[in-house]
């Protein structure tokens, strides 16, 4: 097996952008907690109606409460994003399902926001703040995965197969991924239980694959079959 590469990210470089605001807004109006209470905890009195990705930080800040902005700043400081990956070629013992078409190389990986973030979440007495901090952790993890793709050199031309995202790739594949990085994961404090759930909570594993695109349309050129392209943020 190829050597495992460990990458540590600085969460303070992940600036709040439109994607974070949209995610918080989407979660604020769901029924997991009282929508009104969550919305008031996150957004200013004026209802956030979205916008394009060109919004600058000043415009974003006008949508969010000071409490939420402080929460985001704290989360950046406490998070310790880290990822492990290696490059798998034809010679490696990576057995993706035969009905999932793919080209090599494949990049198995595990990414986490860190144990400190989980500990920090448990310190909140106000459930709405804990909920928002959890969503911020999901967003930070997503940014970590994006940054990993850039570090590998894939840029925006990649997709990810997450165990459990399609019938051919059940969640039990987490065990295979964990075994690939067992030493690094254990030293980082990452564990996997019998139900294939990771701890810390904000941890994800998958297979990153390059698109075989021609530069025009990634999806039409991609060779993946039955690609559900499950985003960890949904």
Image (spheres, rainbow, N blue to C red):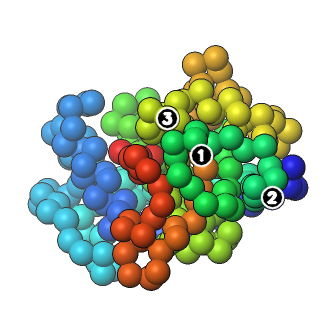
Residue shown at 21% from the left, 32% from the top: 31
Residue 172: where, in percent of width, then height?
A: 59, 27
Q: Nearer the viewer, mark 1 or mark 2?
A: 1
Mark 3 neighbour class, 10 Å CA radius: few under 14, some 14 to 19, many 20 or more:
some
| First in residue order: circle 1 vs circle 2 | 2
User: Would residue 83 be visible to someone looking at this image?
Assistant: no
Residue 3: where, in percent of width, then height?
A: 87, 55
Q: What separation in Å lies between label 1 and label 2 (alpha carbons)?
A: 15 Å
Q: Is residue 56 left or right of residue 190?
A: left
Residue 206 circle label: 1
Circles 3 and 1: CB distance less than 8 Å?
no
The image quadrant where one finds the C terminus is top left
Q: Which residue is mark 3?
A: 168
- Indicate the secondary structure of the residue bearing disc 1: strand
- Indicate the secondary structure of the residue bearing disc 2: strand
| First in residue order: circle 2 vs circle 3 | 2
- Indicate the secondary structure of the residue bearing disc 3: loop
Q: Which residue is mark 2?
A: 5
* Quarter of the view holding residue 182: top right
Residue shown at 60% from the left, 72% from the top: 154
| First in residue order: circle 3 vs circle 1 | 3
Q: What separation in Å lies between label 3 and label 1 (alpha carbons)?
A: 14 Å
Numbered marks: total: 3
Q: Nearer the viewer, mark 2 or mark 3?
A: 3
Residue shown at 38% from the left, 37% from the top: 131
Q: What separation in Å lies between label 2 and label 3 (alpha carbons)?
A: 27 Å
Mark 1 neighbour class, 10 Å CA radius: few under 14, some 14 to 19, many 20 or more:
many
């Amino acid at each position: 097996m190829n050597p495992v590469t460990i990458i540590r990210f600085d969460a303070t470089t992940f600036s709040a952008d439109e994607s974070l605001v949209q995610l918080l807004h989407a979660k604020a109006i769901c029924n997991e907690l009282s929508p009104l209470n969550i919305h008031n905890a996150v957004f200013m009195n004026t209802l956030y109606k979205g916008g394009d990705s060109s919004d600058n930080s000043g415009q974003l800040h006008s949508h969010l409460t000071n409490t939420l902005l402080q929460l985001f700043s704290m989360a950046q400081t406490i998070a310790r994003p880290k990822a492990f990956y290696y490059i798998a070629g034809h010679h490696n013992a990576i057995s993706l399902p035969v009905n999932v078409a793919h080209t090599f190389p494949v990049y198995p990986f595990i990414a986490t926001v860190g144990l400190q973030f989980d500990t920090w979440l448990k310190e909140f007495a106000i459930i709405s703040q804990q909920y928002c901090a959890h969503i911020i952790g999901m967003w930070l993890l997503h940014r970590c995965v994006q940054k990993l793709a850039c570090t590998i050199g894939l840029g925006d031309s990649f997709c990810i197969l997450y165990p459990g995202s399609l019938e051919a790739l059940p969640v039990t594949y987490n065990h295979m991924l964990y075994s690939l990085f067992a030493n690094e994961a254990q030293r980082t404090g990452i564990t996997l239980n019998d139900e294939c759930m990771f701890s810390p909570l904000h941890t994800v594993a998958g297979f990153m694959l390059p698109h075989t695109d021609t530069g025009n349309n990634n999806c039409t050129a991609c060779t993946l079959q039955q690609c559900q392209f499950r985003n960890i943020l949904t």
